[in-house]
């Protein structure tokens, strides 16, 4: 039950602000977050690959 409440709260926090922002701002923020996640994924992959060998 607590997980469900937390999930709805998180969903409201993530979906609420983009509904109030203009589309270009929302798309720019989404692109920045996407690049950040891509950089993180590459760094983690390199770190695991280096320590795994």
Image: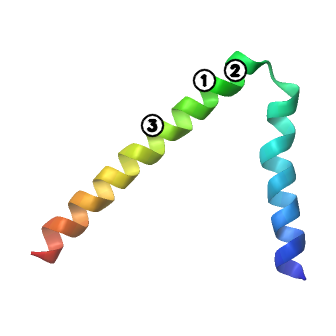
Relative to the observer, which residue lies in front, 23 or 2? 23
**What whole-number distance in Å separates the C-alpha atoms at marks 2 and 3?**
15 Å
Q: Which residue is mark 2?
A: 25
Q: Secondary structure at mark 2?
A: helix
Image check: 37 left or right of 9?
Answer: left
Residue at x 54%, y 30% (from the top left corner): 31
Closer to the N terminus: mark 2 or mark 3?
A: 2
Classify 53 as above or below 42.
below
Please tell me in which quadrant of the rendered image residue 38 appears: top left
Say the numbered circle drawn on residue 28: 1
* Badge 1 vs badge 2, beta-carbon distance below 8 Å: yes
Q: CA distance from mark 1 to mark 2?
A: 5 Å
The circle drawn on residue 35 is: 3
Farthest residue to the bottom: give it.
1
Q: Give coordinates of residue 47: x percent, y percent.
A: 23, 63
The C terminus - image quarter: bottom left
Distance from disc 1 to disc 3, alpha carbons, whole Å, reads 11 Å
The quarter in which the N terminus is drawn is: bottom right
**Which residue lies at the image location 37% right of the left edge and 54% below the top edge?**
41
Residue 49 location (% of width, % of height): 18, 67
Q: What kind of element bears circle 3?
A: helix
Q: Identify the residue shown where x is 87% and y is 80%.
A: 2
């Amino acid at each position: 039950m607590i997980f469900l409440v937390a999930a709805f709260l998180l969903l409201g926090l993530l979906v609420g602000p983009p509904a109030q922002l203009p589309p270009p701002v929302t798309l720019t923020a989404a692109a920045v977050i996407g690049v950040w996640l891509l950089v993180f994924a590459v760094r983690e992959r390199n770190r695991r690959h280096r320590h795994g060998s």
